[in-house]
């Protein structure tokens, strides 16, 4: 357009001073705007220049305004929106958009107007297309790879989105820092459209473990965005290494009647703690025993810093694999144990079990099942006595402590190993179980309740296993044996119920109790009284000792002299003084020749006391030591009753005072250690090697507010003088003498008629005890008071084995000693309760004390004694004394009761039979009746 | 840093973690049957034969229990047939009772006058006994309860009465300042370091499967967690999976089998002989089993609604310890933490301040498997202000006079009633009308974190026929 020409009417030379055409009168705007449309893109083209030209001859005032009054955010005009343009001149205006003020994804086309001289009619339109440019936004603030295992990689996703309104072009995505960080894929030149989210996999791949947290970054640069972006990445690498030791379990030659236990150690050799979620077996013959269900195995590094808890273990953990091939056929069996760590592959432990069925051992073994120690003897050709002793697996000694410690619900140990552990685990320990056999006492271990017979059976089972090992070792041909035949000894005055428990324990331990054989023998005995008894597995301890000594004397002393003594009319008389850990037994034995050759042994009297065993001496010594400690610790209120009190008092106090399990366990440990201390002191008294006793402060305790408090210091106790020991033992010594004299009286033997005193039981080693015994026999030569430590402890077991061997006729007839039935005498009387006064029933003796057994007595109950119901109820008692009163009489104890249906018959014949095992059986009108056994009621004692 | 005791009560087992002043994590353990264990079954079993005794009176039995101490609770409870799974007397036929927090959160417990008066006491005594070992673990380590910050993780559906009982218990034990964390939040805390992010938490209750969309944001110093929406898939809970596994093993689903499964997955002791092993499950729950039990289709619909298809998924709960079940739900982004990892998440989160923001809305249980929204969260009164909402409802079905109706007001973000917390319930007897009006008076505390209110149920002609009060914590800041 010519500037002098009206664009509407094309008239020439309009009035230059006016904005209206002089020809047509229309508006002439002499403002040029170039360009009229501007596109602004933040970050890419955020600024553009406008040219405004004033073609008029006068000054022009121009204001730039949004048409609808709404400004576009972030749009700036430079030098401003109010402009003055000189005539025929051009003004440059820069339009810029501030990316920071632009909302994400902004895209807007706005119309601005350039109004001339404030006259709204005079305007030029400026179209502004404003867009936010590509606007990257990270959706991932940091890349935390957490724990990355050595040799493995962990992937995280880095998310990026474009909040701008134009596509975002990525120039590069690269990892910065350690080489472990890697971008998975190529992202150069990649476009991210508006609103799109791009996921970029980032890997952290470790080759080797670094202890510290490693840091790195991922950098993203853009082709069309000026600012690059950095995402921090971090990872803690760790080494995972879990090992099983051993890596393979093999049980070769596994005997089918036994269980095999092996410890397996799982060790964390990595650098991170590992959580074990389960340990399990895949076979029914394999059981896993652990002391923690799920647990954390600390790495060697964190072991230093972290404390442990009951389910957090430093570095390694041991569990047990118990294999019981009982029901498996002979041959190889395979299984596996699986250890499952959380988040890792399981570890497998292959297990191979080769099952062997052992041969039945034809001979008897002898078991002296003692209160404190047990001894087992087997036949052996290697020893000139024909007997060998089984040795404890740990100590190698023939005395095997009768201590049982449960390791876990599935496994336990006995013997020296158990005794060593007993002090630290009193709540899992069984001591002196023989003492509570027959009593109403159960103990709970691992939430399973055990009767005394069951606990005894566990010990006997192990004793038998030790014997089998000995037989295997002695066999010379590698043969394995299964022992089913054994002679087990019991104290002379063992109660019927106690013997029943022993028999039950033997049966549970897999021994043949030979019930049928015993019954046959009893029947024969009835037909021909006086014959030898060749049945029963129970043997009185004094009888066993007498058998052994007799054999020993014949082999080692003047055989002729012994034979001569035996050949006398009155025979050879021996007093067997058996003072063991739990019981004191005294027996008088007579040895004579029997018709048909051989030697016969008769027990003429057999008496005992279960209340004055060696344990009681220990308690007496313990009380004296405690008394001295209390005296020494005058400022510390030592609570001696915690240690010296009876077990039932201890438990009562626990209930009343609400001690925690830990407190109870610790106190039991203290009690057990005091018992050991007292026993050691007793042994030193016996050995005459007394020294001062150091009592540690942790054994000197009291309870304050439910917690155990120790004495501030230990105490040194000077050796006990002979007078003190004499005084302490006075009640025991008196009882010893009383029993000896009673036994002699019962046997009808004068002290001067006794040829030998045979000591068995370790309490005889106490000089006070031995002196006491000797004083009853002032005329006896010292050489005939046989107290040799070598025999003292083992003579009973050997005697039992000898008895078994003789029964099986393995011994030459001349050397055979026959245990004559008329020499077996009952230490108690047996009877029933009288009907005359139901309030104060009396003991009605049926079988008298001292009677030979097996024995049968029949009692007739006439119709008038049968109740109207037709049921005859009878209670059986055993009487160790002579009194007839039942109620409140400590000598009379209930064996059991029966209920007989007389079925309308007139009266009833009740037969009481004491069998070869010295247990009572009852027959009503010739038919056996089941006895409902009672339990003995325990007197208050220290033992738990 | 103050030591913390963090207890998880949300699942089938109870577990606790002691965080020492040095920040060390010591799992609380106890010895049961001579085996140290971290997880103990929360189950309380019941021998039904006890109630066959004519002299047995429930109310007396419950009153006896409410007076028990933690030490003698289960001794007394044995007399009325309650057992722990590891009790020697817990027979195969023992029934499983519902957890105390479930019972206390049930609408029945809110409305039954007899139960309402006794249950809190029994619940308190039972919880005390259940958690006794955890509290004892703290004191045995020489900490005084007053010096330890307690934190308890509870299921999202736990009602205010149950929470009140928990608070009371913790106070009674000498602890102060209890923090209650919802279970899905505790699970989501594992992703706190990756914020801002959103995840889906999947957890199982006894009967149902719950999905939660949890958003994690906040500034660098204080993360913020918020459950924006949740969904419930009925019948896909623990019982379902337990039954499926039992059938796969060729056995019948039973309480005894569930006990075995709990023992296997958690190590919690049980008196029943345990023959179930992970190896056995691996053999039985094979590809064939998995193909027959795909849950992806059922899950998909809900995931779509939660916008969770591509979000990281956290599987929380004992059942997900089974590889095969985990894989049924799984995707590449699935995380299935070990049971006590919830506790570890909470322990890590407790090191800095955090906020559990309000989410959900006021809802009414239609009793037809739906919880309709009455008031969305943004519509609640502003902090310090009060408001009133009136809503008219038309009753469907049998509206004959005498028909009982339990009106339940809920709080939550779930369309299914099972996924929400019941705030209050009003038992009614219909009088033949087909309409009722619910008036909810609301007051929000000045902090805005707590909502108190009263529900009034009106029937024509505008007669108030029932009223109940409620209170709900909307936000939790630490």
Image (tube, rainbow, N blue to C red):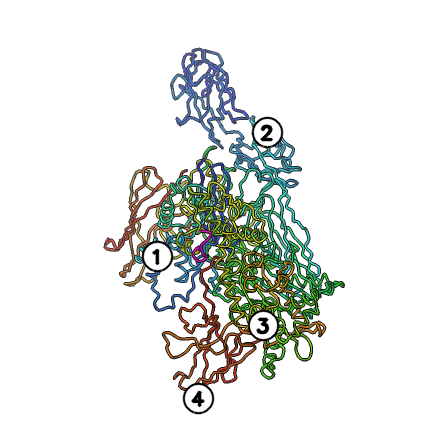
Q: What is the total number of numbered labels drawn onto the structure image?
A: 4
Do the residues bearing badges 4 and 1 touch, measured as CB atoms within 8 Å? Answer: no
Q: Earlier in the sequence, mark 4 or mark 3?
A: 3
Residue sitting at the far right = A477
Vertical placement of residue A895 versus A452, above or below:
below
Q: What's the distance in space between the residues labelled 2 and 1, CA to CA?
A: 62 Å
Q: Is residue A648 magenta?
A: yes
Vertical placement of residue B390 versus A148, above or below:
below
Residue wearing tag 3:
A603
Tell us which disc is closer to us: 3 or 2: 3
Mark 3, Cα crowd under 10 Å, few <14 / some 14-19 / many 20+, is many
Residue wearing tag 2:
A221
Do the residues bearing badges 3 and 2 touch, measured as CB atoms within 8 Å? Answer: no
State left or right for residue A192 relative to residue A817.
Answer: left
Mark 2, Cα crowd under 10 Å, few <14 / some 14-19 / many 20+, is some
Q: Chain of mark 4?
A: A
Q: What's the distance in space between the residues labelled 4 and 1, CA to CA?
A: 69 Å
From which residue to which does the magenta span run? A642-650
In x, y percent, where is residue B335? 54, 46
In x, y percent, where is residue A918? 55, 73
């Amino acid at each position: 357009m010519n500037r002098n020409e009206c664009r509407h009417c094309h008239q020439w030379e309009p009035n230059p001073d006016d904005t209206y055409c002089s020809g047509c009168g229309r508006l002439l705007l002499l403002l040029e705007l170039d360009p009229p449309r501007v596109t602004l893109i933040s970050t890419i083209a955020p600024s553009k220049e406008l040219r405004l030209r004033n073609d008029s001859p006068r000054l022009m005032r121009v204001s730039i305004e949004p048409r609808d009054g709404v400004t576009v955010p972030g749009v700036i005009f430079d030098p401003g929106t109010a402009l003055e343009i000189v005539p025929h001149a051009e003004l440059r205006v820069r339009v810029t958009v501030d990316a920071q003020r632009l909302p994400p994804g902004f895209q807007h086309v706005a119309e601005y107007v350039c109004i001339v001289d404030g006259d709204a009619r005079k305007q030029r339109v400026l179209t502004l297309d404003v867009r936010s440019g590509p606007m990257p936004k990270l959706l991932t603030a940091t890349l935390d790879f957490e724990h990355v295992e050595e040799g493995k990689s962990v992937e995280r996703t880095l998310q990026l989105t474009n909040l701008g309104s134009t596509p975002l072009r990525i120039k590069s995505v690269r990892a910065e820092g350690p080489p472990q960080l890697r971008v998975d894929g190529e992202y150069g030149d990649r476009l991210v459209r508006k609103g799109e989210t791009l996921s970029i996999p980032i890997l952290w791949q470790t080759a080797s473990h670094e202890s510290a947290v490693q840091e790195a970054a991922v950098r993203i640069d853009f082709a069309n965005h000026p600012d690059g972006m950095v995402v921090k990445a971090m990872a803690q690498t760790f080494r995972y290494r879990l090992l099983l030791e051993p890596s393979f379990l093999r049980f070769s030659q596994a005997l089918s009647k036994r269980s095999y236990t092996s410890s397996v150690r799982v060790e964390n050799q990595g650098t991170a703690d590992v959580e074990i979620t389960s340990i399990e077996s895949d076979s029914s013959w394999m059981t896993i025993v652990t002391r923690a269900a799920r647990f954390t195995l600390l790495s060697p590094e964190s072991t230093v810093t972290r404390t442990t808890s009951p389910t957090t273990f430093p570095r390694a953990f041991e569990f047990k694999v118990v294999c019981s091939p009982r029901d498996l056929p002979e041959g190889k069996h395979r299984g596996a144990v699986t250890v499952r760590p959380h988040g890792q592959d399981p570890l497998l432990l292959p297990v191979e079990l080769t099952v062997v069925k052992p041969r039945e051992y034809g001979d008897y073994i002898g078991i002296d099942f003692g209160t404190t120690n047990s001894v087992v003897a087997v036949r052996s050709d290697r020893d000139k006595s024909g007997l060998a002793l089984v040795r404890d697996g740990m100590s190698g000694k023939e005395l095997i402590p009768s201590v049982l410690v449960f390791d876990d619900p599935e496994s336990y140990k006995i013997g020296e190993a158990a005794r060593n552990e007993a002090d630290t685990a009193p709540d899992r320990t069984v001591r002196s179980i023989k003492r509570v056999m027959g009593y109403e006492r159960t103990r709970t271990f691992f939430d399973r309740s055990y009767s005394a017979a069951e606990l005894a059976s566990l010990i006997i089972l192990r004793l038998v296993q030790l014997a089998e090992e000995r037989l295997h070792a002695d066999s010379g041909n590698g043969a394995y044996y299964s022992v089913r035949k054994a002679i087990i000894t019991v104290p002379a005055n063992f109660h019927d119920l106690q013997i029943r428990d022993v028999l039950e324990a033997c049966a549970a331990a897999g021994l043949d109790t030979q019930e049928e054989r015993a019954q046959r023998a009893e029947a024969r005995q009835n037909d021909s009284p006086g014959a030898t008894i060749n049945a029963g597995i129970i043997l009185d301890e004094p009888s066993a000792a007498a058998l052994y000594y007799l054999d020993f004397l014949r082999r080692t002393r003047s055989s002729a002299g012994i034979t001569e003594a035996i050949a006398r009319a009155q025979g050879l008389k021996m007093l067997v003084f058996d003072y063991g850990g739990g019981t004191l037994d005294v027996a008088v034995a007579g040895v004579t020749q029997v018709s048909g050759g051989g030697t016969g042994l008769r027990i003429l009297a057999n008496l005992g006391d279960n209340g004055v065993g060696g344990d009681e001496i220990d308690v007496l010594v313990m009380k004296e030591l405690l008394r001295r400690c209390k005296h020494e610790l005058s400022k510390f209120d030592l609570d001696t009753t915690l240690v010296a009190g009876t077990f039932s008092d201890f438990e009562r106090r626990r209930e009343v005072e609400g001690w925690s399990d830990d407190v109870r366990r610790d106190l039991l440990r203290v009690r057990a250690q005091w018992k050991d201390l007292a026993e050691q002191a007793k042994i030193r008294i016996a050995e005459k090697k007394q020294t001062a006793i150091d009592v540690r402060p942790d054994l000197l305790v009291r309870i304050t507010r439910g917690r155990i408090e120790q004495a501030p210091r230990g105490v040194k106790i000077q050796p006990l003088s002979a007078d003190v020991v004499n005084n302490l033992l006075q009640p025991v010594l008196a009882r010893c003498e009383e029993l000896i004299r009673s036994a002699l009286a019962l046997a009808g033997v004068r002290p001067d008629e006794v040829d030998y005193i045979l000591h068995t039981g370790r309490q005889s080693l106490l000089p006070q005890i031995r002196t006491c015994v000797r004083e009853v026999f002032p005329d006896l030569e010292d050489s005939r008071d046989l107290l040799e430590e070598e025999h003292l402890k083992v003579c009973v077991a050997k005697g039992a084995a000898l008895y078994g061997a003789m029964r099986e006729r393995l011994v030459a007839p001349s050397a055979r000693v026959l245990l004559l039935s008329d020499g077996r005498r009952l230490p108690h009387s047996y009877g029933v309760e009288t009907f005359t006064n139901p309030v104060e029933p009396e003991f009605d003796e049926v079988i008298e004390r001292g009677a030979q057994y097996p024995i049968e007595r029949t009692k007739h109950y006439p119709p008038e004694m049968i109740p109207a119901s037709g049921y005859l109820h009878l209670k059986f008692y055993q009487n160790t004394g002579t009194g007839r009163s039942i109620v409140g009489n400590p000598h009379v104890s209930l064996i059991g009761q029966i209920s007989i249906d007389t079925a309308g018959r007139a009266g009833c014949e009740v037969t009481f039979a004491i069998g070869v095992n010295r247990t009572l059986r009852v027959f009503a009108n010739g038919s056996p009746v089941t006895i409902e056994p009672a339990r003995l009621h325990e007197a208050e004692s220290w033992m738990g | 840093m103050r030591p913390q005791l963090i207890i998880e009560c949300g699942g089938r087992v109870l577990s606790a973690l002691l965080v020492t002043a040095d920040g060390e994590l010591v799992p609380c353990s106890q010895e049961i049957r001579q085996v140290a264990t971290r997880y103990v079954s929360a189950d309380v079993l019941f021998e039904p034969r006890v109630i066959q005794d004519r002299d047995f009176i429930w109310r007396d039995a419950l009153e006896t229990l409410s007076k028990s101490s933690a030490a003698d609770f289960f001794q007394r409870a044995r007399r009325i047939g309650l057992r722990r799974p590891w009790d020697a007397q817990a027979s195969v036929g023992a029934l499983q009772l519902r957890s105390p927090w479930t019972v206390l959160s049930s609408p029945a417990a809110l409305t039954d006058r007899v139960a309402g008066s006794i249950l809190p006491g029994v619940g308190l005594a039972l919880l005390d006994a259940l958690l006794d070992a955890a509290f004892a673990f703290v004191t045995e380590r020489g900490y005084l309860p007053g010096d330890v910050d307690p934190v308890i993780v509870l299921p999202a559906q736990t009602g205010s009465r149950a929470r009140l009982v928990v608070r009371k218990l913790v106070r009674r034990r000498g602890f102060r300042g209890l923090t209650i964390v919802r279970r899905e939040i505790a699970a989501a805390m594992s992703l706190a370091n990756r914020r801002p992010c959103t995840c889906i938490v999947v957890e199982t209750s006894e009967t149902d499967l719950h999905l939660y969309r949890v958003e994690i944001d906040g500034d660098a110093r204080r993360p913020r967690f918020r459950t924006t929406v949740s969904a419930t898939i009925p019948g896909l809970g623990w019982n379902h999976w337990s039954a499926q596994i039992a059938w796969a093993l060729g056995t019948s689903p039973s309480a005894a089998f569930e006990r075995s499964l709990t023992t296997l997955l958690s190590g919690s002791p049980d008196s029943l002989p345990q023959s179930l092993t992970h190896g056995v499950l691996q053999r039985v729950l094979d590809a064939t089993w998995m193909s027959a039990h795909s849950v992806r289709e059922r899950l998909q619909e809900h995931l779509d609604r939660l916008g969770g298809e591509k979000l990281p998924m956290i599987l929380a709960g004992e059942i997900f310890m089974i590889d095969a079940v985990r894989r049924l739900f799984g995707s590449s982004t699935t995380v299935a933490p070990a049971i006590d990892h919830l506790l570890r998440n909470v322990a890590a989160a407790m090191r800095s301040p955090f906020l559990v923001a309000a989410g959900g809305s006021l809802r009414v249980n239609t009793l037809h498997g739906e919880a309709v929204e009455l008031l969305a969260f943004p519509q609640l009164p502003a902090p310090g202000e009060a408001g009133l909402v009136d809503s008219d409802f038309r009753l469907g079905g049998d509206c004959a006079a005498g028909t009982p109706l339990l009106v339940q007001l809920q709080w939550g973000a779930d369309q299914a009633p099972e996924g929400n917390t019941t705030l209050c319930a009003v038992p009614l007897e219909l009088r033949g009308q087909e309409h009722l009006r619910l008036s909810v008076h609301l007051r929000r505390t000045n902090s805005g974190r707590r909502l108190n209110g009263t529900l009034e149920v009106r029937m024509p002609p505008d007669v108030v026929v029932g009223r109940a009060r409620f209170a709900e914590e909307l936000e939790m800041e630490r």
